[in-house]
Amino acid sequence: MYYTKFLCLLSIPALLLVGCASAPVQKSATEPLTETQQTSSQQSPADNLTTLYQKAVTELNDSDYETAEKSFQKITKIDAELAGPWANLALIHIKQNRYQEAENKVKIALDKNPKMAQALNIAGVIEQRKGNINKAKNYYQKAITNKPDYALAHYNLALLYDVYLQEIAKAVIHYQRYLSLSDQQDKKTSIWVKELKRNLPQGDT
């Protein structure tokens, strides 16, 4: 049994860091996790940027993608050097199945901030959808390198090891790390990890 979660929309007041705003929905067995990016007034010369950013994040979390896209585009015109809005635009395009545009936007985000774990995670999602599993793995690993406590990247990496690469011992490690870092009660993943561990050869657990 393989399963995963829908592209999770997340936001808390923090400096380009976010947490889950709602529990992710179960989806197909090959769909990884992504999240929205939030900024702070310290990162912009515009006094109203924080308010505008929070509004855009709310629109995105409410699945009002058309309005959210316009809001994030407006933010890029106020301060084009912020990486977060470009990452959020990439996420919106993924939601709308506009993958080439998503890829273009996440490249801009990573150009602004090559170490942004959330943008690296989105890049991994795009590569995974394209079937480039090793490229996706590299992006998820980079996300974890830059943000070791990034739960979603651990989940996505576990998913690759589990479903695509059949390296179950490594999958278990990252599933467990995801569970330890996640604020959610993810009973399905917990049960699945126990099943995987039972089927591992002795010494691999």
Image (cartoon, grey):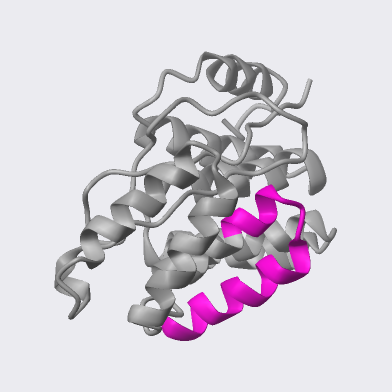
Instruction: From the viewer's side, name the closer residue of 6 and 194.
Output: 6
Q: On the picture, is 19 further left or further right than 175?
A: left
Q: Quadrant of residue 185?
A: top left
Instruction: From the viewer's side, name the closer residue of 125 and 148.
Output: 125
Q: On the picture, is 41 further left or further right than 53?
A: left
Q: Quadrant of residue 199?
A: top right
Q: On the picture, is 8 further left or further right than 131?
A: left
Q: Residue at x 21, y 74 (%)?
A: 43
Q: Which residues are magenta?
A: 91-112
Q: Position of residue 181 (x, y in %)?
A: 36, 37
Instruction: Residue 149: tell me if it is visible.
Output: no
Query: Which quadrant would the N terminus be assigned to in this image?
Result: top right
Identify whether 147 is placed above or below 42: above
Instruction: Residue 127: tell me if it is visible.
Output: yes
Identify whether 78 is placed above or below 26: below
Q: Position of residue 58 (x, y in %)?
A: 38, 43
Q: Position of residue 142 (x, y in %)?
A: 51, 68
Q: Residue at x 60, y 25 (%)?
A: 25
Instruction: From the viewer's side, name the closer residue of 188 and 11.
Output: 11
Number of disc labels? 0
Q: State yes or no: residue 121 in magenta.
A: no
| Dominant SS in magenta | helix
Q: Residue at x 59, y 63 (%)?
A: 90
Q: Position of residue 69 (x, y in %)?
A: 54, 59
Query: Which quadrant would the C terminus be assigned to in this image?
Result: top right
Q: State yes or no: residue 102 in magenta.
A: yes
